Amino acid sequence: MGFLNKIIKKSDKSTQKAAQDQTKKVAKPQPERELTIAEIKEKGLTKATAGEAKKSVKASVIKENTREAYRVLLKPLITEKGTYLASHNKYLFAVPTGTNKLEIKKAIKALYGVTPESVNIIAVSGKNVRYGRSKGRTKDRKKAIVTLAKGQSIEVYEGV
C-alpha cells in the first residue's frame, strides 16, 4: 500500500480533501425565534397565523424548560420541618446529587414562575441499613431549601 500512495499525485489528494470538506459542511438548523413585523408582511402572513407561529415557538421553549426543570427538582419534600419552613417562605425540594444552586434557581423559575432570593443545598449521606443478615446502604441525596421574596409563594401541596 505504501508503494501505491507514492504514485498518487498531490493534486488528487487536494481534490479529495476539497470533496471531504464539502460533505462536512452541512447546514445547521437555525434556532426558532419570534417573527418581526417586517417578516410577517414580507411573507404575507395574517395577524392570526403570525400569532400562532409565535405561540408555537414560545410553547416549545417552555416545554424544554419544564422538561429540564423536572429533571432538576425531583419532588417537594413534605415533612414537619418543611411545613414549618413554608410559613417563612422557604420550601424544601429533593434534587439529584449533581445539581448546583443556579440550576435549581432556573428550575424554580421555569416551573413556578417565581424567582428565588436564595437557594441553600444540604448534602445528606446514605445510612448503613440491615435487613436480617443482609447489609446495605441507602443512597446519598441532596435537599434544596428555596427562599422566596415576601409575598411570593409556591403551591406545593397540589399534587400530593
Image: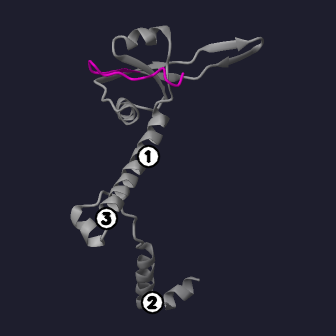
Quadrant of the image containing the C terminus: top right
What amino acid is found at the position of numbered circle 3 in the picture?
A: Thr
Is 127 left, or right, of 89 in this rendering?
Answer: right
Residue on which the image places disc 2: 12
Q: x%, y% of residue 55?
A: 37, 52
Q: Which residues are magenta?
A: 145-160
Amino acid type of disc 2?
A: Asp
Mark 3 and mark 1: Cα distance apart in space: 28 Å
Q: Compare marks 1 and 2 and give the one earlier in the sequence.
A: 2
Which residue appears at 38% of the width and 31% of the height? Answer: 112
The answer to whether the residue labelled 1 contacts the one labelled 2, judged by CB atoms less than 8 Å apart, is no
User: Residue, x 41% and y 42% (percent of image)?
Assistant: 65
**Above or below 24: residue 107:** above
Q: Which mark is residue 46?
A: 3
Residue closer to the observer: 97 or 3: 97
Whether residue 74 is in magenta: the answer is no
Residue drawn at x 42%, y 50% as measured from the top left:
60
